[in-house]
Image: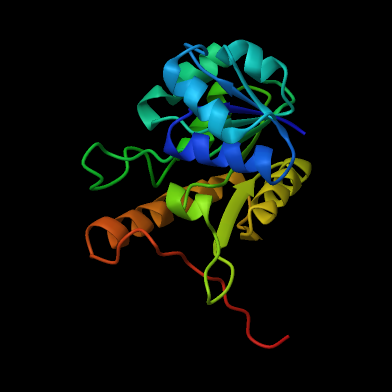
Amino acid sequence: MNICIIGSGNVGGTLGSRFAKEGGHKVVFGARNPNSNELKQLLSEAGPNTTAASVADAAKASDVVLLATPWGATKNAIESAGDLSGKIVIDATNPLLPDLSGLEVGRDSSAGELVAQWAQGAKVVKAFNTVGNNVMADSKFVSGRVAMFYCGDDTSAKKVAAGLATELGFDALDAGPLSQCRVLEPFALLWISLAFKAGFGREIGFQFMRRGA
């Protein structure tokens, strides 16, 4: 599968590297400056299945576009990507306030729903937003698989997102339609508050337990 990653920071760099190394996918990082030293370093670590290009070229050449941008840069990133009609767009963003005290968007809308408005015609799935990049890098816990909830309105697109999450060792769980972003984005804030404010640290994750068989 050809995957474009927009946002090559901690989340985007980690996911793109694992998709390329462990999933065998062709990953292209879309960036304003694809020749930057930071991207060259990332590509050398991520391996031969990764390249870098402009945001528009990376998105055009890919089946799946994953957004791993800071929330404030997300709309501009989508505009830079050009026409995303028909493409699967995985939204891994969270609309966090700068001090992590809450969300900029919520209740009657969500980041994922705004992404769908900005990326007209795209098949948007919310995923990879409820744990830190350290858990994305190593999802193994002694107690079992970490839950990775996802939501969206397109069944085929959700299957792709679920497959990618499963490849990385997560327990992929369908949380319903895209409007469920209004639940999953606050859920991400719970992880952040437990990790950074309640003193539990970053090596935490949530499990989904099933009674019986």
Residue sitting farthest toward the front: 44
* Direction from residue 95 to residue 63 in the image, left or right: right
Q: Is residue 78 visible?
A: yes
Task: Locate the C terminus by quadrant.
Answer: bottom right
* Direction from residue 5 to residue 189 in the image, left or right: left
Q: Nearer the viewer, residue 124 or 208?
A: 208
The correct choice, above or below, for 51 with respect to 89 in the image is: above
State the image coordinates of residue 50 (x, y, percent, origin top left).
Answer: 65, 27
The correct choice, above or below, for 140 with respect to 10 in the image is: below
Measuring 49% from the left and 19% from the top, which residue is drawn there? 77
The correct choice, above or below, for 130 with respect to 96 in the image is: below
Q: Nearer the viewer, residue 53 or 92?
A: 53
State the image coordinates of residue 113 (x, y, percent, origin top left).
Answer: 52, 36
Q: Quadrant of residue 173?
A: bottom right
Measuring 53% from the left and 77% from the top, which residue is drawn there? 143
Q: Quadrant of residue 84?
A: top right
State the image coordinates of residue 108 (x, y, percent, origin top left).
Answer: 42, 43
Measuring 65% from the left and 11% from the top, which residue is drawn there? 57
* Direction from residue 78 to residue 171 in the image, left or right: right
